[in-house]
Image (tube, helix red, strand yellow):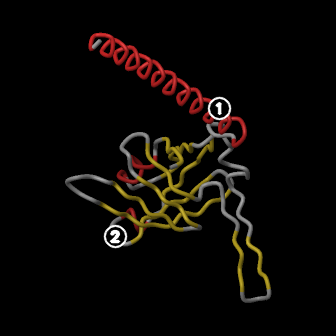
Amino acid sequence: MCAKKRTSKRRSVKKQKKSHSYLIIFIVIIAIAAAAIAYFVYGVGKTKHAFPTKPHTTITKTVHKKKTIRAKSALEGTWVSTSDGRMLEIYGNLFTLELPSVSEHKITKGKISISGNTASILFTGTNDKCSRDAGTYSFVVGKGSIRFSVKHDNCPGRKQIFSTTWERF
């Protein structure tokens, strides 16, 4: 009589394991279905155009003589250099250039002036030719990236930094 009880317990354990595997498969199917619904309903994973305006577009409107509303240009935002990982943050006519490094954390600030597809870049806060003479660069805006090409720049360091492709962060 004892032997019969043991076999029935073994069979019920096997049934429980089998039902657990069906439960896990059911949960995985639900997770995949939820991901598919999120993808199609919310557009997760779709590329969006990063530059809805032309690169040289900057609009300034004065409202009630006290408040100035400024629209962002296509260059505004945070960019990452594809060559060395530098971070370039452009806001209005100012920029911050940051080289994240373990040994040295260097931040450089400057001014940027945009006219058409040409940018004049000037470092501020230093007493060398990089802060006295602005460098002139042409740029091309792509989907999520920007490429600067030097037109004229007497600052070799700035020329090396900006003559590369930058990806939007």
| Apparent side of residue 5 relative to residue 70 in the rendered image (left or right) | left
Residue occupying the far right of the picture: 64
Question: Residue 101 in the image: x percent, y percent?
Answer: 27, 52
Is 69 drawn above or below residue 86 in the view shown? below
Picture quadrant of residue 33: top right
Is 4 drawn above or below residue 76 in the view shown? above
Which of 65/138 is in front?
A: 65
Disc 1 crowd rating (10 Å Cα; few below 14, some 14-19, many 20+) is: few
Which of 30/22 is in front?
A: 22
Which of 133/73 is in front?
A: 73
Picture quadrant of residue 63: bottom right
Question: Residue 29 in the image: x percent, y percent?
Answer: 58, 26
Q: Report the quarter where the N terminus lies.
A: top left
Query: In the rendered image, which residue does mark 1 sit on?
Result: 36
What is the three-letter code of the residue carrying label 1? Ala
Disc 2 crowd rating (10 Å Cα; few below 14, some 14-19, many 20+) is: few
CA distance for labels 2 and 1 = 53 Å
**SS label for mark 1:** helix
Picture residue at 36% right of the left edge, 43% below the top:
84
Picture residue at 69% right of the left edge, 40% below the top:
43
Residue occupying the far front of the picture: 1
| Apparent side of residue 158 relative to residue 105 in the rendered image (left or right) | right
Instruction: Return the mark for residue 13.
Output: none
Instruction: Return the mark for residue 126.
Output: 2
Is 22 drawn above or below residue 142 in the view shown? above
Question: Residue 45 in the image: x percent, y percent?
Answer: 62, 37
Is mark 2 in CB contact (under 8 Å) with mark 1?
Answer: no
| Apparent side of residue 2 relative to residue 57 in the rendered image (left or right) | left
